[in-house]
Image (tube, rainbow, N blue to C red):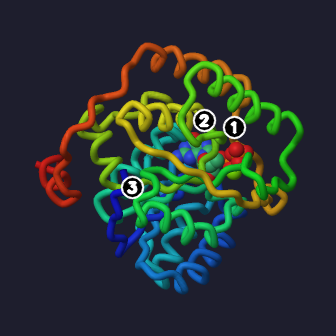
Amino acid sequence: MKTPTQVNEVAIVLPAYNEEQDLPKLLENIREKLARMPFAYNVIVVDDGSKDRTADIAREFAKTMPLKLVQHVVNKGLGEGVQTGLREGWLVGDVVIVMDADNSHDPVYIEEMVKKIRDGDADVVIASRFQPGSVVQGVPFFRQVLSWGCFLMMKTLLPYRNVRDYSTGFRAYRSLTLGRLIKNAGPQFLQESSFACMLELMLSLRWVGARAAEIPYTLRYDLKVGVSKMRIWRTIKRYFNVIGRYWAKDVLPQTQEPSLNELRTQLRA
Ligand SMILES: Nc1nc2c(ncn2[C@@H]2O[C@H](COP(=O)(O)OP(=O)(O)O)[C@@H](O)[C@H]2O)c(=O)[nH]1
Ligand SMILES: [Mg+2]
């Protein structure tokens, strides 16, 4: 069922941990590309206890673009960072984008992702490495094997219609759907602090009955200057834990939802 949604404003969440080398280029790129898109935007930088200049950079850019800095005093992990960003983001944007702060995700794709939600084609749109036309530049071989492994495992164990890229961080979420997730799962809707949180988030959206779509894109991992923060073996181990938790969970029955504003009022109270 198509349910078009008005999109006046998007929130762009950037979970960031020690991203001083790549964050400035990304923020400049967002400022330039989003100025040409037919909606307003607000960037939410979630600085997760960085020990470098990440927070200073965000404060500096906040003088010249719509940007809010949210800080965790100590490092809590990607899952907590994404959760903090989504909890803020759905209250300000009709759509929430989450993307890496390492300049490997190009904000130019946001327009197409938002359009799919606006037209009612999907509740979550994934910039996917596994669509015809997708290009992956500069990703180490083992990392590619890992994301393919995640795809094959999910297709076999817990398939999600239209989804191939289960583990990427570059997605657009309809705020109403995030509200529905928070209403049903509570404010701690992600339990994973590791990078497996991205898979956990997909499975929690599947649980609330969100419809997914993917778009092809070019991942510019070659542009990333800083080091990857992913702990590969820990992530693999946690993938199994996440799948185990969602294995026997039935999809929630679809009910008539309140509007986004009603849901915001309800959950704020
Ligand atoms: N909030 C938060 N973000 C993190 C943490 N570790 C990594 N990130 C961010 O998560 C995103 C993905 O990390 P990245 O190193 O780019 O991983 P890769 O691209 O998969 O190699 C980046 O924006 C990081 O800054 C963390 O502990 N907390
Ligand atoms: Mg990255």
Q: Which residue is mark 3?
A: 174
Amino acid at circle 2: Phe
- Whole-angstrom CA distance, mark 1 to mark 2, is 7 Å
Residue 214 circle label:
none
Q: Position of residue 84 (x, y in %)?
A: 39, 47
Q: Residue at x 65, y 21 (%)?
A: 156
Q: Residue at x 69, y 37 (%)?
A: 230
Q: Is mark 3 within 8 Å of ligand 1?
A: no
Q: Is residue 129 left or right of residue 242?
A: right
- On the question of residue 51 being in view, the answer is no
Amino acid at circle 3: Arg
Q: Is residue 162 left or right of residue 143?
A: left
Q: Is mark 2 within 8 Å of ligand 1?
A: yes
Q: Nearer the viewer, residue 159 or 267?
A: 159
Q: Residue at x 59, y 41 (%)?
A: 163
Q: Is mark 1 within 8 Å of ligand 1?
A: yes
First-in-chain label (2 vs 3): 3
Badge 2: how crowded within 10 Å, few (<14), some, or many (20+)? many
Q: Which residue is mark 2?
A: 195
First-in-chain label (1 vs 2): 2
- Whole-angstrom CA distance, mark 1 to mark 3, is 27 Å
- On the question of residue 101 being in view, the answer is yes
Q: Position of residue 99 (x, y in %)?
A: 58, 56
First-in-chain label (1 vs 3): 3
Q: Nearer the viewer, residue 66 or 129?
A: 129
Mark 2 or 3, which is nearer the eye? Answer: 3
Q: Which residue is mark 1?
A: 230
